[in-house]
Image (spheres, rainbow, N blue to C red):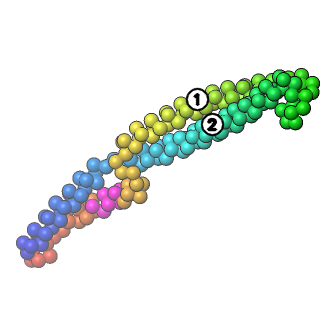
Amino acid sequence: VTKWKTDTIAEIATINEKLEKVEEVDIDGQQKLNNEMVAISAELKDARIVQKDAETKITSFMRKKKKTENEYTSLLSDECPYCKQYEDTKDKMQECQDDIDEFIKEIESLGSQLEKADVSVADYTTQLEEVKSKITVSNVDELIQIKSESSLYHQKLDTLKGAINPFVE
């Protein structure tokens, strides 16, 4: 008779402790933070793709510019950069200069695009770190389990509090 009462009181105390731990977690807030983290991560990934693309294009245009500058230098001495023969090179020189000017414009444009991407990456990284620092439960499945356990603990607690000792007549 007294064992049932002692066991029930101990179980109620255990459930109350578990409920306190579960209720310390702001489940909705944590879910919101996890969703925000996913969204920021996607934005960060997109910004890094833009950043990498701009870097790749800048490198490509820099190589093309360097090659064209070498051609131009060769043409200054009236020498064909390909066959090393002497010829009239004025038209080709103008074409090279136009190409160099175009490469410079592209590099400058991509440079500003890269600067914007760098700023975006830095901003998203900062935002992501801020959100991560606020997350106490990073696993969404764990949040759902905690929410479920909370309901179960409340039900079990209500049942135990209203239970009647079957050993008492």
What's the residue type where badge 1 is placed? Glu
Which residue is rendered at x = 37% and y = 57% of the image? 142
Q: Nearer the viewer, residue 127 or 6?
A: 127
Which residue is rendered at x = 45% and y = 35% of the image? 126
Judge the density around disc 1: few (<14), some (14-19), many (≥20) Cα neighbours within 10 Å: some
Q: Nearer the viewer, residue 141 or 49?
A: 49
Can you say which quadrant of the picture contains the N terminus?
Answer: bottom left
Q: Is residue 83 magenta?
A: no
Q: Which stretch is magenta? A: 146-153
Question: Could one spot residue 102 in this view of the protein?
Answer: no
> Would residue 75 appear left or right of 167 to someone viewing this image?
right
Between discs 2 and 1, the one toward the N terminus: 2
Residue 61 placed where, x, y %?
71, 33
Please give the residue where the numbered disc 1 appears in the rendered image: 115
> Residue 55: which disc?
2
Which residue is rendered at x = 34% and y = 48% of the image? 136
Mark 2 lies on a secondary structure that is helix
